[in-house]
Amino acid sequence: MITRYRIGTPFDMESVVVQLPVHDGALPGWETDAQNKCLTRTLAKSDIVYGLGESVRGINKRGWLYTSNNSDDPHHEETKHSLYASQNFVIVFSPDTKIAFGLYVDAPGKINFDIAYTDPDVFSISFEDFDADLYLVEAGSLKEIVREFRGLIGRSYIPPKWAFGLGQSRWSYMTADEVREVADSYDEAGIPLDMIYLDIDYMERYKDFTVNEEAFPDFEAFVKEMKDRGIHLVPIIDAGVKIEEGYPVYEEGIEKGYFCKKENGEELVAAVWPGTAHFPDFLNEDARRWFGDWYGFLTEKGIDGFWNDMNEPAIFYTADHLKEVFEGIRSFEGKNMDLRTFFGFKGLVASLENNPEDYRRFYHDFHGQKVRHDKVHNLFGYYMTRAAGEAFTRLRPGKRTLMFSRSSYIGMHRYGGVWTGDNQSWWSHILLNLRQLPALNMCGFMYSGADLGGFGQDCTEDLVLRWLSLGIFTPLMRDHAAMGTRRQELYRFKNTEAFRNIVGLRYALIPYLYSEFMKAVLKNDMLFLPLSFEFPDDERALTVEDQLYVGESIMIAPVYEQNARGRYVYLPERMKLLRFRSASDFDEEILEKGDHYVPADLNEVLVFLRPGHVLPLAASGARRVDEINEQDLTWFTFEGRPEEYELYTDDGISAIN
């Protein structure tokens, strides 16, 4: 059962697809403090809080302050409060009473979720603007609460099947020949590959919907060449449109008034990759359709996948604030800068990027109403990806198009997936990747993944191998790294055989992973489950935060510590351990319920098969998803029968109504 409550006069964010009447009265179980713009409730000592999608810290969110305020911040440390997304759905579960409820706070501005941080017994939600629709979700189990909520917000995005293959990316592949070299090197190493991503340097001077013809001559022929090899090129699209006379996207946007404006009616001038730029007003339906149609510039050349970036929106600086900073800097000239003044001087320059005041400088036309950006800040990335998703139904009717985004809000899950942004080559980010997966699924984001190996900093070979032991189970599987970091294409490492075998195992798993993904999407279930969702009565399962169920049949427990030769695993039930070195090289062992130390070499992947279930594996050797032979499956069983398993199959490209 879902009941809708309301505080203030919120906007219709179009994040839900089922329109419920507003229930009179206050949200039960919560105290409403209109003066301080907050909701509070008491938590029992054992209460667990799940959710909040892409956020820092553990699966249990208790004990920290989380802020919904989409932020361009690549340093995803425990101390942070905001990442790139705002997904305001939580589940509160009481193990003592076995009572749980879900709460969705549908409000696009800044919100603080103080989950037993200030007071260890209190959960408080505070707002900058006390306007929100509140959806209380009640059901008999944790999984049923998620199903009810997912029914409210609508079916999750479904990518083409080839998007379950490995993708290789790097900021940046500078020329078509460099892309060819990557494809050739993967094929020579025998490592499967389905996608190569194009970061900003494929563009002409960082302008959306352009191609650098010197570096990528005859782009349409190049796209076809790669597709004939079975490799899809996936270009990036950024949120800022370069200010440049003669650039059609800019000139059309100016002519039609489709860019965000300041209060005085002038277009906001901000800076991102191309320098000074305007932001399309994605919240304006006409502007959204206009920008979406521009994706046709690339789909007409054969492109069938994209990733949207910098859409928090990220701001290097605005022209207005840059002027203020220069004026401030001049005031320090000739002065003796002591401790305080020196840090004040430094702070001036540091204040240029993603300055909160800049988000108050511009406005949107939202349903015919002039709305200041900070009031709806968290919708920007959602509506940019919505522009693309709606356009693909016009540009590529009846077909699926790969689309995922950095910034998101609930509702965007209907139009694309997410990657979790600019992470780092840190061992702790393997664990963070794992912990974010079930929370993303709760909020409808099913096609998701992290930059494997880490985007920033220099990776190590063992880190990439261990990260792959998680990454081969995530729907979005992409190796991505920043310019200037160590090259981490998988063929560059010494132990090429291990990388070949682990990626080969991913391709062998695709019949299972795709089946479980599709069934979860179509039935509003989760692909990734914490152990507590399956065993809410098991006290040990309630505390495990580094193992996940993946679909109905298996549990994973990746190693995420450097130099570890294995790890401790808790089994809430008797299981069969499959220790894979490749899809055809493995050990089997029955383990009883309880705690176990399980050895795992760098080239080994641990998979735990549940009793009464089966795991189908395709024959090894496929270099592309399209080469996987689903008629030739090996069935791993543990007290289960293959004929009882529902293997989902389709053509992998046709849109599903």
Image (tube, rainbow, N blue to C red):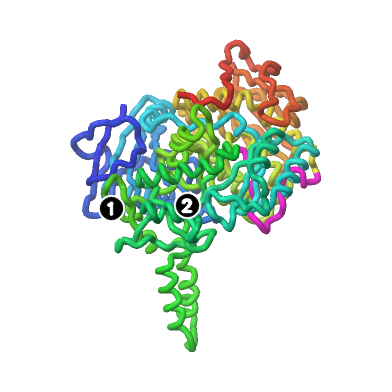
Q: Is residue 90 above or below residue 73?
A: above
Q: Quadrant of residue 118?
A: bottom left
Residue at 48% over, 29% down: 533
Quick one: SS at disc 1?
Answer: strand
Quick one: SS at disc 2?
Answer: helix
Q: Is residue 78 above or below residue 163?
A: below
Instruction: Please provide the residue range marked out in magenta.
Output: 477-494
Q: Is residue 162 above or below residue 613?
A: below
- Which amino acid type is shown beneath numbered disc 2? Val
46, 461: nearer the viewer: 461
**Residue 229 visible in the current orientation:** yes
For label 1, the residue is: 370
Q: Quadrant of residue 136?
A: top left
The image position of residue 229, as x and y in percent, is: 71, 34
The image position of residue 222, as x and y in percent, is: 68, 42
Residue at 40% over, 69% down: 320
The image position of residue 149, as x and y in percent, is: 38, 31
For label 2, the residue is: 249
Contact flag, marks 1 and 2 (Cβ < 8 Å):
no
Q: Is residue 403 left or right of residue 119?
A: right
Structural crowding at the residue carrying mark 1, measured as other residues with C-alpha within 10 Å and reported as few (<14), some (14–19) or many (≥20): few
Which quadrant is the C terminus positioned in?
Answer: top left
- Which amino acid type is shown beneath numbered disc 1? Lys
Q: Is residue 84 left or right of residue 12?
A: right
The image position of residue 630, as x and y in percent, is: 66, 19
Total numbered labels: 2
Is 419 one of the magenta-colored residues?
no
**Residue 47 visible in the current orientation:** no
104, 362: nearer the viewer: 362
